[in-house]
Amino acid sequence: MNRFWMKIVSSLTLVIFASSALLAEPGAAMLYPSGAVMLNGNAIPGATALFKGDIVSTNSSSIAAFNTQNSRISITAQTTVKLEDKAVSLRSGVVTVDTTGGFVTHAANYSVAPTSTTGRYRVVRKGDAILVASLEGPVMVKWGTNSHMVAAGTNWASPSGDGGGQAQPMPTGKLPQDNGLSTGTLIAIGAGMAGLAIGLALTTGNSHPVSPVRP
């Protein structure tokens, strides 16, 4: 092997070890953006490392997703989230969680997680109002000393911010209007999620991880 190829192999080895060490940090993830996505207030050019405490924001024409701790979290347009330890804090917008590791979503005074370690669910937040849809497997919503189990295929809302809503069957193709969460916005969730896989496939295919932007 000549010196040129030895340098190439050495460089690739360093990149692999560096990436492994980077993602070995507890709570670390890889963020894949599609469109203009902000990390801690800074625009990112492509796939990047994400760490506990990092804040991700999308605008009206961007979406993102990240993988961490046996879970995949999809972020729709106009959403802001903060990565926590085995959890994400939803500040506004919509996230969909597909997990085999019991990943939790915090929103306002609520915590949402599958009743077992495996499940797929969606959380919508507008102000202090939330809507939870269980897509696969039951999920548990907790607030204060209260809790409510949302069965698979149903949704639950906090109509007055007190978590008093009852689980309802999920309408095909959309989530119901509630708490000022407009029907148009909720219908758009489905379209946004359909385009997410395509957008992220293009992003991951043409991007390389960049250094994380820390606060």
Image: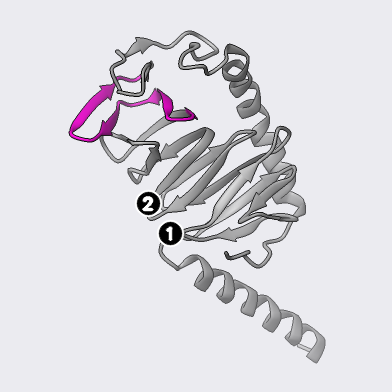
Which one is nearer the viewer's eye here, 143 or 132? 143
Q: Which mark is residue 27?
A: 1
In the rendered image of this protein, does residue 161 appear above or below residue 172? below
User: For the point 79% across and 91% down, which residue is it?
Assistant: 3
- Amino acid carrying label 1: it is Gly
Label 1: element kind: loop
| Residue at 63%, 20% in the rendered image | 188
Task: State yes or no: discs 1 and 2 in contact (Cβ < 8 Å).
Answer: yes
Residue 92 placement (x, y as % from top left): 53, 35
Out of 122 and 143, give the one closest to the viewer. 143
Residue highlighted by disc 2: 86
* Amino acid carrying mark 2 in the image: Lys
Which residue occupies 64% across, 74% down? 15
- Image quarter hosting the C terminus: bottom right
Q: Position of residue 80 (x, y in %)?
A: 56, 42
Asked if residue 98 is among those painted magenta in the image, a careful observer would answer: no
Which region of the structure is painted magenta? 125-152
